[in-house]
Amino acid sequence: MSSCCVLGCENWRNNTCDSKLKFYRIPADTPSQKTRRQLWLNAIRRSNWTETIVNNAHVCSAHFISGEASLDAESPDFVPSVFPHKQQNSIPSEKMERPARKKKKEHRKMLQKSTNKEITKEDILELRLIAPDAVVLTSIEKSDTDTASECDKVEDPPEPPEPPTAAHDPALEQQRTAADLKESCKKAFQKSRRNIHTEQCGPSMANETLKKKEDKVLVPKSSFKDIITGKNINYQDLKMQHSVLYQAYTKLLAEAQQLRTDNEKLRNSLQSDFSKLSYRFLKWDAKQIRFLTGLPSVAFDWLLSRIEYNVIRVHPEFKAEDHLLIVLMKLKMGLCDDDLGYRFRMSGEIITAICQTWIPTLAVLLSPLIEWQSDDVIHKSKPDIFKTKFRKCCCFLDCVEFAVATPKGATKHVKYFVSTTPAGAISFLAPGFNRSVSEQQALKMSGFFELFKTPSQILASRTFAIKEELAKIRVTLHTPARGFTADSAVWSHVNVVLGWWKDFGIFQTAVPASYEEMMNDVVMACAALTNLKMSLVPNVVKNQKRKRKRKDAV
């Protein structure tokens, strides 16, 4: 429901019986309507108006002389002028007749000049703007042709006079429509303005100046009805509209082309990102993370928070989580550096540099996870299967040999002594020794015998030649006998953790020669990562509860 915003006017759309009453919005704040909008606001004279109120305000047709708003700048109804508080100085009908009388007067002058052959280019342009629909004589059209020819600087030879015919009757020529004159005047005006301005300022500056002038000219828009009927058309307004629309169209084309280019770049980058392996696309897949690294997602995030600020990134385009993913995949899956480079879209040399930088740091940060536990901690975490025959057992000792490739192409073996607790954690790891070093000497150099403070038991999968050294510190060594079945659960239990450690892919074949100098760091990192896995104790407890339930059921 719309109401008139003029003070003292009570017209609104639903309470009036006058079906001819119309309501007009205040012109919008656009470059072509800005001047007209200000004229309307000055005529209405309302104070304390916000932009929202102005945009929603309406003015009824009762405040226009003809009862309808006009888009003609010379019309009195271009701006509302009939207000209750304003006294009219003249009769409204006279105001409406003034523009028509002015046009007739100017048209009469142009006709007089045309009969005396004194018409000029400026007169044609003035006639085009003042009386576009007037009937003109042939002399005006001839003068326009002469003007256009002067602008184009083309001299045509004189044509021989033609005999008078009915087609060239002056009376018929005077009845020609204004369409031909408008078109010729338009061409002459454009050529003359272009030539004159080009002579003064040059071609490039002339085009820029004309463009600025066209942008600043504010011409009222012709109504849609006039464009359809072909009457009262303001060609200057149409020209301005075409120029503005063409500029907007050109700008939109440029923006669309830029968007297409950006879209293509994003598509190519997205395809390249999906074609290479990255933690960005794996972090939501916990199963895949466990398969590639051997760690659950929670352990991966914790490890990343510990190491990302303690080591540099070798490849600046890859984040810290991608560096850690490469290192863990190298250790867990045992892939060669070229294979990892193909998966991550980089060279094998960069993969080697990443591993050589991150693995030593990883070993230092995770070395506290391999710690010899006290007797109380071992006893509290010991599964029930150890509390009968092996209640004094504190660890399970084993010796593992790994093959390492040398730069000369040969292969050497390095042995490591490792012990695990009954609960399933690696508690001791000695540095690597050559095969020539005896077991007694290796364990003595590693400080293994100094860890025992009280009488204890040690389980081993084979017999070690260290019984005399263990007897001195009151420690007994137990090995499984042939056909031993009563305590098979104990041996299978302690072998699980060592199986996790031995199953790292990097140990399945000879360790590359580029990792020979950091072999101890590789073994330490794999042992510490083994302790980050789920403990064996919960699984043992579950199995014991299931057995008890079965016995109770029987």
Image: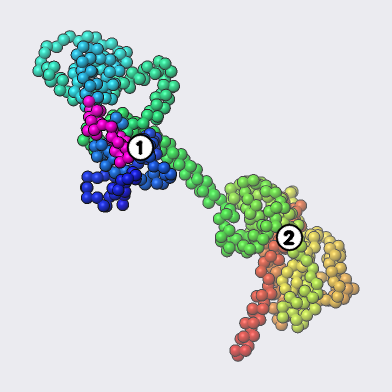
Q: Position of residue 127 (x, y in %)?
A: 26, 22
Q: Quadrant of the C terminus?
A: bottom right
Residue 477 on the magenta segment? no
| In the image: residue 110, left or right of residue 203 | left
As shown in the figure, which amino acid type bears the numbered disc 2? Leu
Residue 99 on the magenta segment? yes
Quadrant of residue 422 in the image? bottom right
Residue found 79% across the figure and 59% down from its top: 432
For disc 2, the neighbor class at 10 Å (few under 14, some 14 to 19, many from 20) is many
| In the image: residue 34, left or right of residue 453 | left
Residue that numbered label 1 is attached to: 43
Q: Is residue 106 above or below residue 67?
A: above
Label 1, label 2: how far apart the Cα atoms are? 83 Å
* Along the line of sight, the residue nearer the viewer: 369 or 75: 75
Can residue 51 be seen here? no
Residue that numbered label 2 is attached to: 366
Mark found first going from the N terminus, 1 or 2: 1
Which region is colored magenta? 76-101
Quadrant of residue 171 in the image? top left
Instruction: Name the mark nearer the viewer: 1 or 2.
Output: 1
For disc 1, the neighbor class at 10 Å (few under 14, some 14 to 19, many from 20) is some
Q: Is residue 52 above or below residue 468?
A: above
As shown in the figure, which amino acid type bears the numbered disc 1? Ala
Which colour assignment does the render follow?
A: rainbow
* Along the line of sight, the residue nearer the viewer: 384 or 449: 384
| In the image: residue 551, left or right of residue 365 | left
Please, what secondary structure does the residue beneath circle 1 have? helix
Please, what secondary structure does the residue beneath circle 2 have? helix
Q: Position of residue 151 (x, y in %)?
A: 32, 15
Q: Position of residue 126 (x, y in %)?
A: 28, 21
Residue found 11% across the figure and 13% down from its top: 164
Callout 1 touching callout 2 (CB < 8 Å):
no
